[in-house]
Image: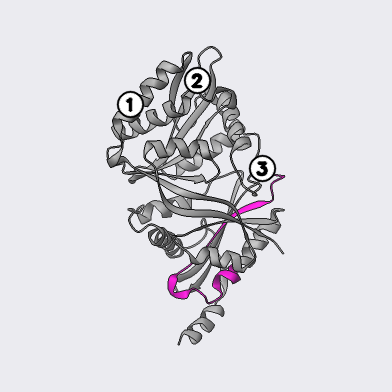
Amino acid sequence: MQTEQAAQARSLPIVPIDPLQASDEVIAELAAQMLAARRERNPEYPQLPLEELVKELRHPPEGALKFGYWGIFQGPRLLARANAMVNLTEKDIPTVSATLYTRPEYRRMGLATRLLEPLREFARQHGKTVLLIEATDHLPGGAAFLAHIGAEAGLIGHVNRLDLHALDRERMQAWARQGEARAGGFQLQFFEGVPPDEWMDSYCKMMTHIMETQPSGTIQFPFQVITAPLVIAMFKMDEDAGRRFWTLAAVEQASRRIVGYTEVVFHPALPQLVYQGGTCVFTEFRNRGLGRWLKASMVLRLVEEVGLARWVITSNADVNASMLKINQEMGFQPAEANAFWQYRLP
């Protein structure tokens, strides 16, 4: 029976999915499968309402970010899918970010292998030569599949998680006080969404610095000089999806220059899960307590203003010792092991 089922599955066509043109039924099935994948990876987490993910798929970002979706359907049911994203402004970077997912009962039937072809074609169309794919020990078959097709693990790390119900508030308050006292000549500046015009140039320089200095293992991660139009487009994507994006910046008062920042993002329909974005301090301003001041002040704001927030989730490279030290002292603990793999196009 398994052999017959596999033969039938392998005979099904690969269908491109256009989020703007596909039927409501197809988009709802795509969203439902994406949520099923998240539940399989982290069954303890609450899920975004289906209608919110459908809305996000129906409103892809305009401009530099290009998405592709492909599926293998059996009737109305999506058995396996592939999706990819490329930034059209990244001229010298060979990578396309990609995801493959197959329903558990249809694995080891060759569906993911078949879905590599549209991913390869998508990459070629945009002048790219490498697919960048994440694997996690919560879905152990992913790493085995990537090794089987000849991909290489390029950046190894962990998803780390902070339980806000167990947060040591007194320690965070002490960090905030110490940071303010120690960092004379600096102040914290908070903004939600797109940075105000007065901070945009400085924010872009800060973002460019983190792109230059982030650990990347053997992967050539996308790097570019961050510009205001790109920042606005990035924030518009979050705004269109209904997400709230908070930034807390450390500002040198004399120069009015952003010298460090931390950021978080969450969806009001799923406030229990908060995702930690980047945290960085310019090299010449490190070892002054700015990182702890920023991180402590942000998490205290979350506790005070987002009452339902439960988890702060972040992904850290194992080689990023300085950030791991701060996170561990805050109470972050490893939740899953992950790695980014490079599949070089044949």
Residue contact at pointers 2 and 3, CB within 8 angstroms: no
At label 2, the amino acid type is Val
Identify the image quadrant of residue 265: top left
Which numbered marker is on residue 121?
Answer: none
In what element is the residue under mark 1? helix
Q: Tell me residue 325's x, y (percent).
A: 46, 37
Residue with the mark numbered 2: 251
Residue with the mark numbered 3: 89
Left or right: 114 as drawn, with respect to 184: right
At label 3, the amino acid type is Thr
Tell me the CA gap for discs 2 and 1. Answer: 20 Å
At label 1, the amino acid type is Gln
In what element is the residue under mark 2? strand
Give the magenta part as a residue range: 89-115
Left or right: 220 as drawn, with respect to 35: right
Instruction: Please tell me which residue lies in front, 28 or 91.
Output: 91
